[in-house]
Amino acid sequence: MSNTRSDRVRRDLVSAATVVAPQWPLSSTVAVNPLAGFEDRWFDEALHDAALLFGARGRLTDADYRAALAAGRITLDALEESLRGRYPDLDGATISAEVEQILAMDGFDADAPRRQALTVAEHHDLTHGTMIRAEIDLLISDWCARWSTDPDAGGYWDGWCAEHQGGWPTDPAEALVAALDHLRVPGHDHRSYLERHLTALPGWVAHLRWRDEPTPGDLLGHVAACVSLEAELVDPRAGRSDAFPWWYTSDGPPLPTPNPGVNPLAVWHDAYERVVHDQILSSITAVDDDQQTSASPLAQVVCCIDVRSEGLRRQLEACGPYETFGYAGFFGLAATMTPFGATPDGPGASDQCPVMVSPEVSLTEVATGEVDDQHLADHELARLRATAAIEDGWRAAKYHPVAPLALAEAAGWVLGPAAAVRTAAPGLAGWIADHLPTGRRSRARSAFDRSALSTSEQAEIVAGILRLGRSEDAGRSHLGAPLVILCGHTSTSDNNPLESGLACGACGGHSGASNARAVAAMANDPQVRQALADAGLALPATTWFLAAEHNTATDVVEVLDRHLVPAPLTSLLSQLRMDLSAAGDAAASDRVAALPGAGGAGSRLRQVRRRNRDWAEPVAELGQAGNAAFVVGPRARTRGVDLGRRVFLHSYEPSLDPDGATLKGILTAPLVVAQWINAQYYFSTTDPEVFGAGSKTVHNVLGDVGVLTGPGGDLRRGLPLQSVRAGDRLLHEPVRLLTVVEGNLDLVDAAIDGSVVLQQLVHNEWILLVARPEPGVPFRQRTQTGWHDRPLLDATRQVAA
């Protein structure tokens, strides 16, 4: 390993860069824990360190918790249990006294946290009243915006040096070393100092981390530009006395505590979490003795584990003898999917898998080969190419610095009336758009070419779904109803640059329909079925797989490729579609109370379904707001329970997993994705400005890169304010993810021991893991020291307002 100073600073940067999580572009937005780089630390320690670097809140305020207390959202039992869990040496009398003191402390955290891990420029500004840091941010942000949207731009550092003649070395690592020397940063402090620059403009750093994975290239150029510019702007004659080491980080004034070591905000928050977590555990316990499953379901529907699927599944099961399952929404197919008319390298292709997974294969949608289909396909292809050309021209004009003015002059007389209709009557405008020829689904019949996958590879993908099935009840060991629906999901909303963040995270921020169609075709393939039978997973000859797409903004479910269903099943399919429609209507109506601005006069259903067509509506849907738990186990444990669209539901049959391989896969992949989602919502709520994207009302779109607040500045991260708060009302309650597993505890331990990521999440309390080997027995919680009893709170003991 080379050990030159340039090599060492490169390694320091790789290590330091973890303090800012990567951020994907607008076309494929996925949730990320903004403190993912802190997961190697205990949760409380991570919040403390993040506050120093970002100047951000990691919990709600004292006033928020007191409001929750007044509303009965926090109970006396929960406060006492929080103290007992954090400080096990305290006796009962001391715990009661501590609760009283915490209740007596009011508004002690009124001042927001300040960033205290400062750069030289920031310390200079504080000491001399200058604004050097603001000047650096302005120049760097302006450069980032221009460079990131220029398709012909070269490397970051080369472009920066061409514009800013500073006389620095052409190699960015050498330039960074020289700038650090100029600023007198000791070598052992390089990593710490780089963290301070990385967190000064975390939005742009997050974007550069996405571009640079796995090794920094342009990010190195970015940091070199920041530090060299700082070295140029700071007056070398001012503030350079070694009497005050500027790299020293002060922890600031001590937090008021009832007794030494007791953090009142941590106690409040633990109690806040404990109440909602225990409500979920109580709901699961309540159905232990009432396994409401159908012996002979008419159809089985496999939905994404997304919390929004919970409402649809609950309503469909209430419509008749249906069975539902939860599975990651890419259905085990990690592929680059190219839709009909697009090219694998073109803008239409998408990586349909979780972002921590690389696509294993490329599949292209083609006409099925029937005579009529090929004729229709040719017409469809011509239409798609014409549409793409118009869209490319529109996009180029839209994002060019001058062209929008000419575009407005040329197209305003046509688009002005259309805009008026969309503003005054969004429902009517949506109906018109849906019924225009270009808005219809293609009449050409198509399928994804699966020749790149062997029969055995396709069989293994389908087998992952079949293993969701029950091992008992009617003698079935896997899915085998007459119809099995693989239901992917998407979300559509007008004038929403963050729309992809509401689609399927398991599909990389895209719709899961293409994965569902491809995997359903695999499951219907006779050769694949033979391979499954050879592996002991034979499917009944009468079972047929179909794909569907659930639009979570409207709760409308469309069954796809209906022309393929065998004639004997057409009547059943008609009934299923009617029941899916009824379930979607009920699920949509059920969401009205939670939506800001809804609940007034008019149809509840209409209120929900007009929102995604209203381009003035900042909250078309709540997405995964409210998510609080991840349940791994049979549907029988949650069937019939209203979980309020707050729980990720992953189907799991312990008896079908003797070696724990399936459980390990669930806990190390889907659970991690769910934790990212949970953490993004959590931190976007506790600090909407630092960890969230701020208000949508002042967002400006910067190509496919992201959004800015106003005309410039740092790129915004996280969720917009309107996704998590509505005035004083929290649309999302920030609680860590409760993970509930029904299965062998030794297998859970084995999964934890075999995964560093899972060890960090569990041992450092980023997730709270409880499990039990079978229904009817008490839950146990997993900590760094092993399994401990997890009693449920007495929900009746509340503190009076």
Image (cartoon, rainbow, N blue to C red):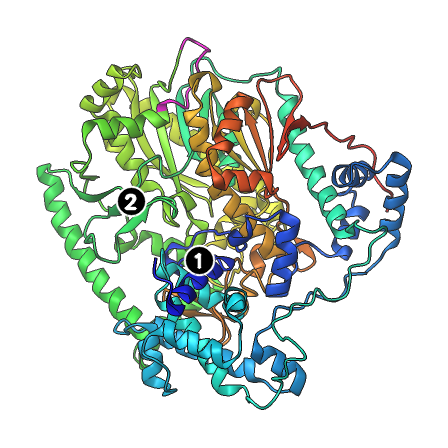
Q: Which mark is residue 795?
A: none
Q: Is residue 468 magenta?
A: yes
Q: Say which quarter of the image contains residue 249.
A: bottom right
Is 142 situated left or right of 264 in this image? left
**Which quadrant of the rendered structure holds the N terminus?**
bottom left
Neighbour class for label 1 at 10 Å: few (<14), some, many (≥20)?
Answer: many
Is 362 situated left or right of 712 in this image? left
Q: Which residues are magenta?
A: 466-475
Q: Say which quarter of the image contains residue 469.
A: top left
Q: Which residue is mark 1?
A: 22
Q: Looking at the picture, does residue 384 appear above or below residue 335?
A: below
Q: Position of residue 178 (x, y in %)?
A: 43, 78
Q: Which residue is mark 2?
A: 359
The residues tagged by marks 1 and 2 sit, at their Cα atoms, a distance apart of 19 Å
Residue occupying image coordinates x 83% and y 39% = 76
Work out whether residue 335 can be spotted: yes
